[in-house]
């Protein structure tokens, strides 16, 4: 069983020392005994609340010409991690969105190759960081097509100005963040991307003014289903990224589409109800007009 591990405390990185082991990484657990089989850390001494809890997907893919049994994570830190399932070995680590706090991955030390953005942040200087604390993507699950060897990911295109304050100001019993953050929001705050897991490169991407925080679900018939914060439920051609169909639900979609069958008929179901930190604090103004709600929508193949 594979488990993503969150960030260390205190939140301000200047109040911590060392790698902060067993935070911000992926852990493999024996489900029969609960024993940890391995732990692979993605973000030693996490400075930007990038965590390590995003959804994990297992697959058999080719890495450097050899088929490997892997577990994959599109991380909030902007890198796509591909690890060997049995050992936790890093097989491929590549950015899938704009990243400037690290220039790549050092496979000898198994640590990021930090840039001056990271080192200046730890020194208390004001820096511009990509991606922001919301990440290159967040809690919403990605999906994988074994026929096309592509991951379908709703990504964020948001940066931030960041400055970590004096860690000595921490007082017991009081909220202790002491980091000043201002979002940097381009015209298109997000994309739906079809990503090669071995390289992190996109075959296609669809821009959205407001980033999507819904999961993706792809089918053997060549469709990718997902939802928008503005309420549209969409079906996309998995080969070229063309939007083929959409339906307006009454609220924003942040859930996970599912497909199922009964009596020989295939259905697709999704929940409609806006929420989440991005929608409440970071998203474009479009979202302020979306009503709250809690409804379940089911569609039938060839139905009306």
Image: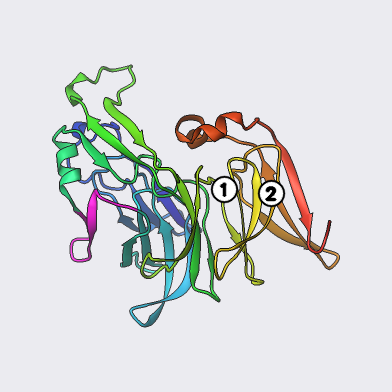
Specify whether 65 is left or right of 118.
right
Quadrant location of the C terminus?
Answer: bottom right
- In magenta, the rendered stretch is 98-113
Q: Which residue is at a point 83% across and 59% down the rendered structure image?
A: 303
Give the image location of residue 248, x and y in percent. Answer: 70, 45
Q: Are marks 2 and 1 in contact (CB under 8 Å)?
A: yes
18 is higher (above) or lower (below) than 205: above
Give the image location of residue 43, x and y in percent. Answer: 28, 49
Is residue 100 located in the magenta-colored stretch of the structure?
Answer: yes
214 is higher (above) or lower (below) than 206: above
Q: Secondary structure at mark 1?
A: loop
- Label 2: how many Cα within 10 Å (few below 14, some 14–19, many 20+): many
Give the image location of residue 286, x and y in percent. Answer: 55, 34
Give the image location of residue 247, x and y in percent. Answer: 71, 49
Q: Secondary structure at mark 2?
A: strand
Specify whether 85 is left or right of 301.
left
- Label 1: how many Cα within 10 Å (few below 14, some 14–19, many 20+): many
The span from disc 2 to disc 1 (Cα, nearest Å) is 10 Å
- Residue at mark 1: 214
Q: Which residue is at a point 62% across and 39% down the rendered structure image?
A: 252
Q: Which residue is at a point 21% across and 26% down the rendered structure image?
A: 165
- Residue at mark 2: 270
Quadrant of the rendered image containing residue 287: top right
């Amino acid at each position: 069983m594979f488990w993503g591990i969150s960030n260390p405390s205190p939140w301000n990185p200047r109040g911590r020392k060392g790698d902060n082991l067993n935070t911000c990484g992926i852990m493999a657990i024996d489900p029969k005994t609960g024993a940890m089989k391995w732990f692979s850390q993605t973000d030693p001494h996490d400075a930007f609340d990038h965590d390590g809890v995003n959804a994990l997907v297992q697959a058999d893919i080719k890495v450097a010409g050899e088929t490997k049994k892997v577990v994959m994570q599109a991380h909030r830190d902007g890198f796509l991690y591909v690890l060997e399932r049995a050992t936790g070995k890093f097989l491929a680590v590549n950015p899938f969105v704009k990243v400037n706090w690290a220039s790549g991955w050092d496979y000898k030390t198994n640590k990021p190759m930090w840039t001056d953005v990271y080192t200046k942040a730890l020194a208390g200087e004001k820096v511009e960081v990509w991606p922001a604390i919301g990440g290159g993507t967040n809690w919403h699950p990605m999906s994988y097509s074994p026929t096309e060897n592509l991951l379908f990911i709703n990504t964020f295109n948001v940066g931030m100005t960041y400055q970590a304050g004096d860690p000595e100001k921490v007082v017991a019993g009081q909220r202790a963040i002491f980091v000043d953050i201002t979002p940097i929001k381009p015209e298109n705050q997000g994309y739906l991307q079809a990503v090669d897991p071995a390289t992190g490169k996109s075959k296609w991407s669809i821009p959205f003014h407001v980033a999507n925080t819904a999961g993706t679900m792809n089918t053997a018939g060549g469709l990718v289903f997902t939802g928008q914060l503005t309420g549209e439920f969409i079906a996309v051609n998995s080969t070229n990224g063309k939007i083929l169909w959409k339906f307006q639900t009454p609220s924003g979609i942040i859930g996970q589409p599912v497909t199922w069958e009964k009596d020989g008929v295939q259905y697709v179901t999704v929940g409609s109800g806006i929420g989440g930190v991005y929608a409440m604090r970071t998203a474009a103004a479009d979202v302020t007009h979306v009503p709250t709600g809690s409804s379940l929508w089911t569609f039938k193949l060839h139905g009306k």
